Image (spheres, helix red, strand yellow):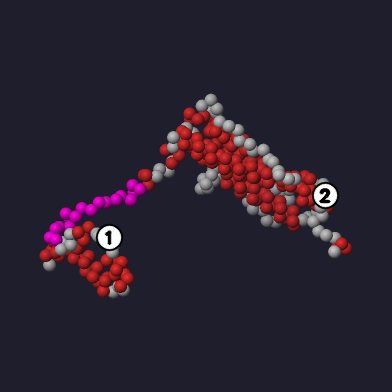
Amino acid sequence: MEISRHCPTLLFDSELRHRHLRHSDSLAASTLARRPALPSDLYRGRKLPLTKINPSVIDITDVGSAFPLDFWHMLSEKQFRERAKTELRQIANQVLSVATDRDIYWRLEREIVQLNPQLRNARSAFLDLVRAAYADATAARVLRLLDGQDCAISLPRVLAQLANYPQLLHDRITERECAADQAALAQAAENLKQVSEPHFAHHERTLSALAATHRATDAAIDLTISTVKTYYWIVADSYIDLDIKHAEDPMEIFSSAWTVPALAK
């Protein structure tokens, strides 16, 4: 009763603990016995008011302050330069992949489809599939680079962070020009969003129906390539090659018949 009068919460804690032990199996009891000592354990059985127990308090609201949202702003100029070079190379690899696919697709249209009357004038479910798949996938891939705030890499984000290091722009590009480039990327993304709805029906998959999507996609690809080249030169003081190169002719697959005639079997 002496403990109860001076520190009732300790007695309540003790009763709960013993009640738990009575209704727990041996494994739970042993686990509880090995738990770290609580501040109340240090004073159990001693006539010390609870107000004298003053354990350390950690304010969980302070945790976020150790990791600012603008982490890049903490980097030195040299650190930022290296980080930006790495991200711009990643963006360059992705946009080069998109540009290479674009080159292959339009060569297919010009060199195979348009030169073959059976393909050019026919209503083909296969061509519908190829055209819609290219248009939809390419728009999505380019948008990821231009509007990828939640993605691992984003070209507009690199430019926005570069604005925190105006000394890197010195003698290369003005802050106004950098801001204009950011606005151009944002406009290209917006233009692409307006025409990047998935295409399902045949009438949505013809070249004429896809023309607006192709224009917006091509403009965004060209702008992304130009911007990556410019800012890689600014950050790395070197040139990055984004020329399309094919290890072999992509159209070589069409140089022979795909199916064997029935009489030849």
Quarter of the picture containing the N terminus is bottom left
Residue 31 x, y percent position in the rendering: 31, 66
Nearer-the-camera pick, 167 or 118: 167
151 in the magenta segment: no
Q: Is residue 52 above or below residue 179?
A: below
Q: Main secondary structure of the magenta part?
A: loop
Quarter of the picture containing the C terminus is bottom right
Q: Give the Cα distance between marks 1 and 2.
A: 80 Å
Amino acid identity at mark 2: Asn
Horizontal side of 96 relative to 117 (left or right) equals left
Q: Quarter of the image holding residue 87?
A: top right
Amino acid identity at mark 1: Pro
Q: Quarter of the image holding residue 73?
A: top left
**At numbered mark 1, what does the secondary structure look like: helix, strand or loop?**
loop
Nearer-the-camera pick, 12 or 90: 90
Horizontal side of 39 relative to 166 (left or right) equals left
Horizontal side of 215 relative to 89 (left or right) equals right
At a point 53% along the width and 37% down the height, the residue shown is: 85
The residue positioned farthest toward the left in the image shown:
2
Q: Which residues are magenta?
A: 46-63
The count of marks equals: 2
Q: Which residue is mark 1?
A: 36
User: Mark 1 or 2 closer to N-term?
Assistant: 1
Residue 3 x, y percent position in the rendering: 14, 64
Q: Which mark is residue 119?
A: none
The answer to whether marks 1 and 2 mark residues whose Cβ atoms lie closer than 8 Å is no
Q: Which mark is residue 116?
A: 2
